[in-house]
Image (tube, grey):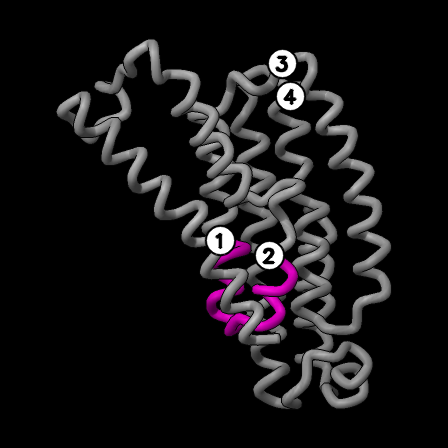
Amino acid sequence: ERFLAGWYFSGYLISTSLPLILVLLYLSFINNSFFFSDWSMPHNCLNIIYYLISFIFFTKVPLLPFHTWLPIVHAEATSIVSIFLSGYIMKLGLLGVYRCSYFIFDPNFIWYLAFCCLACIGFLVTACTELDGKRWLALLSLAHIVVPFIGFYISDWSSVNYIFFYCLGHGLSAGIVFGLLWLFYDLCHTRNWILLKSSVNGIGYMMSVIFSLLSLCSF
């Protein structure tokens, strides 16, 4: 499973990070500047580049149908990688959508959001049956990540700060829970919730678990 997760993560990097770097270098080259404010794109390639950037950022978030790598990679990656993925890199994908993909939030986008919301119900049901702590948290993240896109769609751009505040809270709370699972794995050598419940004792540990889970639920 770790070997498979490595291939999934490699595919994620090759399909998102490498094309993103190449597109940004191309735009910097044709505009002779690395600043977004100085960029203007030729009309004949404007749509292609914008749609390519949108695809890249949707995969980085990730939204359906680009989500399949996330539970597998989270389950097999080291905890520090999971913390950075959930708390930082995925949120940069949302920032990229906000800055570069605003044109996709047209009236027809509501059908895609409705499909994502239905899938979120499936993610939540699957998470309820998942015993692996990291895979469980990855499924919850997939369900939560649709909320900012709903906010982008229904709110005006002047109130977008509330959406990014939600993203900040989710990133911090998910990072705390991943760090807690890291600590418990070092103590018990398992991520199974049932085994953790019977192995981890003490008021300090239990309060840490309750605080982390309530923080995650609040966002």
Q: Tell which tag, 1 or 3, sits nearer the viewer.
A: 1
Q: Tell which tag, 3 or 4, sits nearer the viewer.
A: 3
- Contact, CB < 8 Å: mark 1 with mark 3? no
Indicate the position of residue 88 as horizontal and vertical percent values: 47, 51
For label 2, the residue is 69
**Lower sequence index among marks 4 and 1:** 1
Q: Residue at x 78, y 51 (%)?
A: 123
Say which of 217 and 4 sits in front: 4
Numbered label attached to residue 153: 4
Alpha-carbon span between mark 1 and mark 3: 27 Å
Q: For the residue marked with disc 4, what is the amino acid?
A: Tyr
Horizontal side of residue 121 vs 179, given as left or right: right
**Lower sequence index among marks 2 and 1:** 1
For label 3, the residue is 106
Few, some or many residues within 10 Å of mark 2 (<14, 14–19, 20+): some
Few, some or many residues within 10 Å of mark 4 (<14, 14–19, 20+): some
